[in-house]
Amino acid sequence: MIEIEKMGKPAVPIVSGRFELDAIASARAFAMPDLQFVLVPRIYRNLAIDECISQTEAAIDDLIGILTSEIDEAREAPQITTTERFEGDDRYDAVQRMNDDFILRDWGDAMPLYPPTQEAVDALIEGTNLPADHLVCDMPPGFGLATVEKIAINSAMAGAKPEQMPVIIAGVKALSEIGDQGGKSLLMSTSPHAPMLVVNGPIAKEIGINPKSALGPGRDNQVNITIGRAFSLCLRNIGYWYPGHMDMDTIGTTRKFVHCVAENEEMSPWEPFHVNQGFKAEESAISVFITDGELDVQDQGNVTAEGLLKTIAYGSTFGTRSLGERHTSERLIFMPPDVARPVGAQGFTKRGAREFLHHNANHSLGKMIQFMPLEGEARVAANWKWLESHTEQERLNMTVPLLESADRFYVLVIGADRAKTLVMPSGPSPATVGIDQYIG
Amino acid sequence: MHLLEVLNPVATQRGVLTAMTTTPRPASLDNKTVGLLWSGTHGGDVALKRAGEMIQERFQNVSVNFYTGGNYPAPPPIVKQAGEECDVVIGATAD
């Protein structure tokens, strides 16, 4: 709608009630803060036809009014202060008051925040070679200006250390380089899409990012959690990824407490992931994936490469697919050393393992499209229209490749001992950014 | 008493710095071409078509064009076509 307004033509979207704040936030983010919209009570997608019609008829006066009347009152952008002050009986009390206020404004993740004092922020900026006012990128989905200072403020709130700053900065930059505008649409989706950060290269060991049992809470993952939390707070306060505004998730996911892990390069039979992405092994880099779920794929009996990979291939078949012209879904596979090493030892290169996974990951088309009615659905691309002539049972009986190609399987070696692989639906393709360029 | 001063973590948005105003509105939809831009999701097409019908009932000589790009957000070529061919455009994401 904004693009049409920019062409000089009045435009108005019809928006359901839950998306009112999203519409306002999006209008501001996409540079037309006064764009007007018509509100209807319920989301059309799950309404019967007569309900679609009746709630549209009830909104027609508003719709015509917006198309034929000038705006009465412009929406003002909130003023952003430079500093905030809190008085308390002592420092502890003042920090508590800061936390109460920040959480009320939704600037935090609901867990205690470290106070981002000037001293704390200056110390973090010392961890990079960039000046405070350096613009790293416009951070999606709300496209806030991700300066080094703003990244440092949010990192300070997470309790980050100066040596972690180059990783956090590179992570923020990498998100902005994913797919279409940093995966903006996926971040704003009603499905639980969330970033996943993976660090490769010497810096992982130097600063203590755990490559083994890397996703849980506790001492061993303190650095993983801190970097992920810093990134999460940047995404919130720089990227405007606020729930109900630009994060429209239906239920949500704990993966939105963004995780950061390192690849277990020492226990991998293959080249590190960042080498596949064009970096040298001795360089450090961070990759950002967008994940959409996770499944533990257990295989405690197989010892052959083929058996282990077939189990993962089958385990990868959960999830859904669209009937768009291209099938862009991917799978991010965290393969533990107890799976990767026998597969590698039995002659599989990483590329070979990905090809084998692709050839063995097939599934019922009818199940993957979730029994969706095809007739009249514009999201069925022309190259899939032929499906309309088949019965539901025929669609269920059709077996198709899970993904478009082997390129869409990403295999990273992560984890402790045990043959338990973590498979995550993911996409669009990850972005990888070098870390060394930001080290002070 | 302790005074704690902290820095604000919220960034300025690019869209705020480059904000544009909306287009001037016509006084009436008489003799206008109304674009209906559908994102492809169930129900949105029904809503748009009913809105188009009601506008035709209330105004004189209104043409209605229906567009679908089959996805959200609508593909840029479809958006451009709707903007070029119509005087006003109504959209529905079905959300």
Image: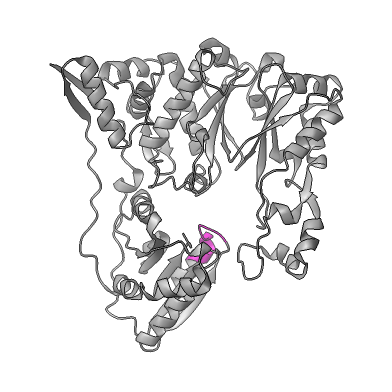
In the displayed structure, does residue B18 sit left or right of residue A295? left
In the displayed structure, does residue B52 sit left or right of residue B11? right
Image point 36% across, 48% down: which residue? Answer: A29
Report the number of discs. Answer: 0
Q: Position of residue A387 (x, y in %)?
A: 75, 65
The structure's colour scheme is one colour
Image point 54% across, 16% down: which residue? Answer: A209
Q: Position of residue A361 (x, y in %)?
A: 78, 42
- Residue A338's place in the image compared with A245, above or below, is above
Q: Position of residue A395 (x, y in %)?
A: 77, 60
- Inspect this view and state whether residue A328 appears: yes
Per the rendered image, the range of residues in magenta is: B71-79
| The quarter of the displayed image where residue A309 is located | top right
- Residue A302's place in the image compared with B28, above or below, is above
In the displayed structure, does residue A147 sit left or right of residue B40? left
Question: For the view shown, which residue lies furthest in the top direction?
Answer: A206
Image point 48% across, 38% down: which residue? Answer: A176
Q: Is residue B72 magenta?
A: yes
